[in-house]
Amino acid sequence: MNKAELVNAIANETGLSKKDTEATINSFVNVVSNSLESKDKVQLIGFGTFETRERAARTARNPQSGEEIHIAASTVPAFKAGKALKEKVNK
């Protein structure tokens, strides 16, 4: 499902206009992104938790040349599914 399909599905389910639904989705994405940028968690009980995780620096190998390359440490966004979501997916 892409963003346009998500907007249509939510608009149909809630009765809101597509314009209001898209504004709400954009706002949700901005709030979650800003929270993760600040290293805060966003927890939606029953759905899941958006959080950041630290990825350590490491050495990898270029598969074409065999040359070793250094990959710097980074912070990555992560999503951990909640119990209710896991149960619904695994019916």
Image: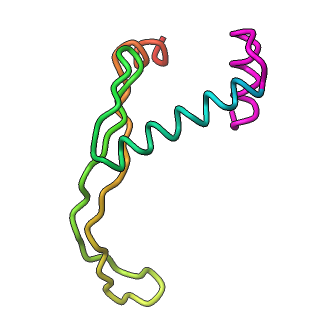
User: Is the residue 56 above or below the residue 32 in the image?
Assistant: below
Relative placement, left or right, of 82 versus 27 is: left
Which of the 4 image quarters holds residue 68?
Answer: bottom left
Magenta region includes residue 11:
yes
Percent across and percent down for residue 76 are: 35, 53
Residue at screen point 61% across, 27% down: 24
Relative placement, left or right, of 68 versus 90 is: left
Which of the 4 image quarters holds residue 33?
Answer: top left
User: Is the residue 44 above or below the residue 57 in the image?
Assistant: above
Front residue of 14/72: it is 14
Residue at screen point 69% across, 18% down: 10
Relative placement, left or right, of 46 versus 9 is: left
Percent across and percent down for residue 8 are: 77, 24
Relative placement, left or right, of 35 versus 10 is: left
Magenta span covers which residues? Answer: 1-18
Percent across and percent down for residue 71 are: 31, 75
Residue at screen point 78% across, 24% down: 18
User: Is the residue 20 above or below the residue 69 in the image?
Assistant: above
Residue at screen point 38% across, 14% down: 46
Percent across and percent down for residue 22 are: 69, 31
